Image: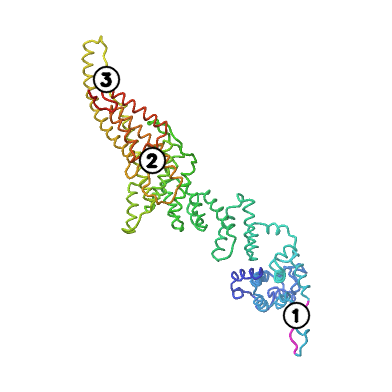
Amino acid sequence: IVVDWLESIAKDEAGNFAENIEFYAKSVYWENTLHVLTQQRSGVAGFSRQLVTELDPDAPIRQKMPLADLDREDDARFMKYLFALIRAGMTDEAQRLCKRCGQAWRAATLEGWKLYHDPNLNGGTVLEPVEGNPNRSVWKACCWRMAEDVSYNSIKNIGVKEIFYDVNLSLKINLKPNFQVLEENKAHYHIIQKFIILGDIDGLMDEFQDWLEKCRSLLPAHLLRFMTHLVLFLWSLGLQTKEDVCTDILKTYIELLIQAKHTYLIAFYVSHLPPELAVTQYSAFLETVTETEQRKLCLDLAREAGLDVAAVTKCVVENIRKKDADEFTHHDLSPSLDTATTEEDRMKINVIEWLVFDPTQRAETLKQSNAIMRKFLASKKHEAAKEVFSKIPRDSVTEVCTSWEDYGMNFMPPAEEENAIREHLCIRAYLEAHEMFNNWFKWMQLAPQEPTISASASFTETVAHEHKQKKFQSDYESWSDELQSLTKDVKEKICNVLLFVNGGWLIDIREDAEEDAERSHQLNLLRQLCLPMMCFLLHTVLHSTKQYQQCLKLADIVASEQHKLYQVFSKEELAKFLHLLRESSLMLLDQNLDPLGYELQS
C-alpha cells in the first residue's frame, strides 16, 4: 500500500521525462571522456587534465578520477531522470532509457529486485523461462552497502530505491537506527502522513484525541488548521470518522479563530458542527461582538454559511440575560428612588439589538425583551427597562400581527405570541405611569415659594414685596395649572395599569400557551411587587393635591372582584394602605365632611 501510494504521487509529478531528456550520446556511454582518452593514446597534445583511464561503470569510484565535464553533466541529468522514473514505478521505461543511452548494464541491474521463480521445478514437458534474480540477497546487500558509502552520490545510488519494492518503509526506518529519522517520524505531520498512507482513519482520530487531551493549548495554529481541514476532507469523501473527536477538533480551531478575531472565517467552520452545537458555538462568539455594524456583518456571514440565524440570535440573548441568577425580591415601597444601571445591565439592554435586524424575529424580540424587563422591574431598575423598551422598533406589534394575516382569516395566532404582545403593552403602560409620576413628583418640588416680609419693613421694602407677591401669584397659577394637568395625566396612566383591560395587568389573554413555569412565577411576583406600589403612588398624587375623596375611592378599586387587586397585597401592604386611607379620612373630617367625603347630615 505504501509503495503504491508513493509511486502514484511520483507518477503524477514525473511527466514524460524520457521524451524530454537530451543527451549528447545516444548509444555510447561517456562519449566525451572516450574521445579524450582516444586522443591521448594517439599522441595528440593539449590534454593536461587527468581523467579516468578506464571506462567501466566503477572506474570513477575505483580510480578516484573524474570524467570529462560534459559527461559529468550528462550523467547527473541522466541519473536525475532515471531516479524520477523509478520513483514513479516506471521501471520498464527506466530500462528502455538506459538501453537507449548506451547503459545496458544499468538496465540489467534494475532487474535485480525481482524474486526468483523457476516454473520448471514443478515438472512439465515444455521448458519455460526462469524469472527473477537467483542472487537477490546478494543484490540487496550490495544496495545497502552502496547506500552507506559516502563516495556514492545519493541520486546515483539508484539501486537503493529498489529496496522499497521489497521492504516496508517503516521496517527500513527501524532497521536503520538513524535518530534524526526517528525524531522526524514522531513529528505531528509525519504521524498524520503515516496514518493516511496506511489508511488507518480510526488510528488517526485516536492520535488527534490524544493530542487534544494532553496539549490542546500548545498545538500550533497551523497544525490545528490542517487537522480541521483534514477532518472536513474526510467528511466530504463520506468516510467513517469518530464524530466526537472531529467535533472536538473543530471546536478547538473555532476557539482559536475567535481569540484571533478572524471574523470572516468563524461562521464557515461553525457550519460544519452538528446543528445544536453550531448554534451554541456561534452564539458564544457573538456575545463578544458589541458594535452594530460588526453584528450585522456576523449575521450576514452566518446566513451565507447556512446557519440557523434565528436560533443563534435567540441563544445569544438568552445567554446574556440569564447570566444574572439573582431571584426576584420584594423591593421597598419608596416610589421615587431607582436602582442604578450597571455594566451587566447595559449588556442586557444592548443584546436586544441582535433580534431587531430581522423583521421576521419581532415576536421573539418581544418575548426576550419582556423577559429582560421583568428582571429590571423587579429590581426597581426602571430607567434600564425604559432603555430596553426604546430598543424595540415601534412597529413590532404591527409586524407580528401582519405576519398572522399572511396565514389567512382562519389562522389561530400562536398563544405565546399573543401573550407576549399583551405583556409588552402591560409593561409599556407601567413604564408610562411610572415616568408620568416622576414628572409629577419633580413638578411638585418646583412649587413657587410665597415671599415673606418682616413687620418692621420700610416703605420701599413693602412696595418691592407687593411686586414679588404679584409675581408669585402669577407663577403659582401657572404652576397650579400645570400641576392639575399632570395630576390628571398621572391618574389616568396609573389607572390604566390598575384597571388593565381583559383580566388585569400582566394576566395572559390565552391560557393554551406552552407552559413556562419561570415566566408564570415572574408575572405573578411582578403583580405583587408593582400593583401595590401603583396604588400607593396614586394615593400620594391624590392626597398631595387634596383630592381626599378620590383617595378613598381607591378602596373600591382594590376591593373590586373584577380585578381582585386585594389578592396581590401582603398583610403589611394592606395595613399601610388602610393607614393612608385613614389619613385621607381625617383630612375630610377637618373639612367638616364625613369620613367618606360627603356632607354631614344635620
Residue 450's label in the rendered image is 3
Give the mark count: 3
Q: Position of residue 94 (x, y in %)?
A: 66, 75
Judging depth in this view, the residue of 68 and 502 nearest the camera is: 502
Residue that carries the numbered disc 2 in the rendered image:
387
Image quadrant for the C terminus?
top left
Magenta stretch holds residue 127: yes
* Residue 45 sits in quarter: bottom right
Q: CA distance from mark 3 to mark 2?
A: 39 Å
- Which SS class for mark 1? loop
For label 3, the SS is loop
**Residues at discs 3 and 1 in contact (Cβ within 8 Å):** no
435 is higher (above) or lower (below) than 154 = above
Q: What is the x, y in percent for residue 492? A: 29, 37
130 vs 393, left or right, is right
Is residue 176 depicted above or below 383 in this figure?
below
Q: Is residue 23 magenta?
A: no
Residue depicted at 36% across the width and 52% down the height:
359
Q: Establish if 600 lies above or below 166.
A: above
Counting residues from the N terminus, which is met first, the one under dot 3 or under dot 1? 1
Magenta residue span: 126-134
* Amino acid carrying mark 3 in the image: Glu
**Mark 1 near mark 2, Cβ–Cβ under 8 Å?**
no
Residue that numbered label 1 is attached to: 117
Outermost residue on the front side: it is 602
Q: Residues within 10 Å of mark 3 (few under 14, many from 20)?
A: few
**Among numbered discs 1 and 2, the one appearing first in the sequence:** 1
Instruction: Check contact, mark 3 vs mark 2: CB within 8 A.
Output: no
Q: For label 2, count other residues whose C-alpha is less than 10 Å away and answer few (under 14), some (14-19) or many (20+).
A: some
